[in-house]
Structures are given as structure tokens and as C-alpha cells.
Image (spheres, rainbow, N blue to C red):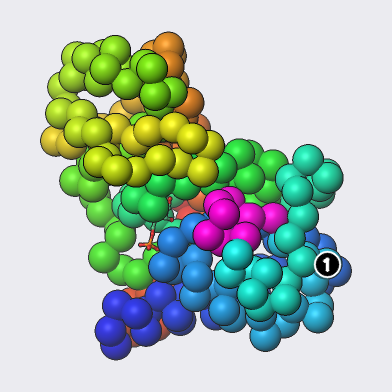
Amino acid sequence: MTQDELKQAVGRAALDYVIDGEIVGVGTGSTANCFIDALAGIKHRIKGAVASSEATRKRLEAHGIKVFDLNDVIDLPVYVDGADEINVEMHMIKGGGGALTREKIVAAVAKKFICIADGSKLVPVLGNFPLPVEVIPMASAYVARELARLGGTPVLREGFVTDNGNLILDLRGLQIVDPVGLETQINQITGVVSNGLFACRPASICLLGTATGVQTLCAD
Ligand code: 5RP
């Protein structure tokens, strides 16, 4: 199977976690897009969706799926999203598409986080994928200096502005042995909006696309 076919397989598999008559939280990226396309086939069974980015909102609406403002939603049983890296403890690096802050907000509201990923995303140690950090523009140089003190190399994502009007620093060269500690530490830097470590609130399960089928993983 190609990587695209694996993404489609996990996108379809995630439909099993969507609750009839409820609102579903929807992530951002190519794997989340596969979920959105699959969700279109059962749109008559759900109340609607909450989007984690403008791109996702547009794709949902193009399929005729009603998109709710998160502020109007109290119960969100499930959030479905991809990841750039995930470990066996269900800690993730996200934000390759730059939507990390809204993804983290929607995930925070949801009861369950269903991560969908092709097999290449499962790693023993997080950090090979550069860790995205969303920053307030006027703080970017200061935050970059502070991030460098953590041992990595921050690189400004050129020509990119988030849906929130902010910038992204991609922190390269880290071996993240304590994802919860690092997520917390980066959040303490003034000017940081959020960072792409999803460890304090890990995925509930991961649907991993492999050559032998979709595997369901959860933390020990
Ligand atoms: C976007 C994300 C995505 O979930 C992550 O980048 C994975 O994307 P893809 O499914 O295209 O590999 O966090 O901000």
C-alpha cells in the first residue's frame, strides 16, 4: 500500500469512533483530510463538526458538513487528527501544517483524541521531526534565543503566518526524552502561544496504518 492509501485506510477506520447525533472535532493535514472525505459519507448521521483550522473548515463545508464555532459547543466526544510523530505513550509532535494551537484547543475540549497516522509516524523517541512553536510576532527573536538554550536550533518558518496571525519557529535537533517536561517548559517562555508537543494531553488511541492493516494502539 502507498502512504496515501494508508492515510485513507486510517481515515475510514476513524469513522468507527464518531458518535451518531454528536459533533466531531476535526484536525488538519493530509491524513485529517482523508478522515473528512470519509466523514462526508456519514454526514447525515452527525450533528456537525468543529474545525481546527481554516483549511479544515473549508473542506468540511465543501462536503456540506455543518461547522460549529467551538464556543457554541459544550460536548465534544471525539477529536480526530493526524500527527507528525507519535510514540508508544501516545505523546505526539504536531503542527507540521502550522495548526497546532487550534488543534490543541479543540483537543482540550474533546473527551477522546483519536490519532490517525501512517506507520512512518510511529517513532521510539520524538524529535527527529522539528518541533513547531507558535509565537507572537514581536517576541520571535526573544523566544528563539530562549529555545536555543534548550539545546535545539530554532528556525523561523519563512513566509508562513498561522490562522491566528502568529509565526512558527521550528525547533530542530532535539531528542525529546521527557515530552511532558519539555511541553511544560516551552509553554513558560513569554511570547509562546503554544508548542507542538501533545504530551500533557496525549492521544487516547492511535489508529496506525500498516502493510498488514490498521492497528489500534493505546498507551500501556
Ligand atoms: C497540522 C498537524 C498535522 O496533523 C500533522 O502535520 C500531520 O499532517 P499529515 O497528516 O499531513 O502528515 O499537526 O498542524
Q: What element carries label 1?
A: loop
Please state if 32 lies on the left or on the right of 183 as rendered: right
Residue at numbered disc 1: 47
Give me the residue at 67% from left, 85% from top.
41
Residue 220 placed where, x, y %? 45, 49
Is residue 98 something one can see in this rendering? yes
Write the start and end of the magenta stretch as one range: 50-57
Q: In which quarter of the image is residue 64?
A: bottom right
Residue 95 placed where, x, y %? 39, 46
Instruction: State the residue in front, 112 or 63.
Output: 63
Question: Relative to 211, is 47 above or below?
Answer: above
Three-letter residue code for mark 1? Lys
Instruction: Classify the position of ligand 1 by quadrant: top left, top right, bottom left or bottom right.
Output: bottom left
Give me the residue at 38% from left, 33% from top.
167
Is residue 202 something one can see in this rendering? no
Q: Quadrant of residue 5?
A: bottom left
Please state if 184 lies on the left or on the right of 80 as rendered: left
In the rendered image, the quadrant that contains the N terminus is bottom left
* Residue 204 is one of the magenta-drawn residues: no
Residue 37 placed where, x, y %? 57, 79
Outermost residue to the front: 159
Question: Relative to 185, is 29 above or below?
Answer: below
Question: Relative to 167, is 103 above or below?
Answer: below
Instruction: State the residue in front, 48 or 109.
Output: 48
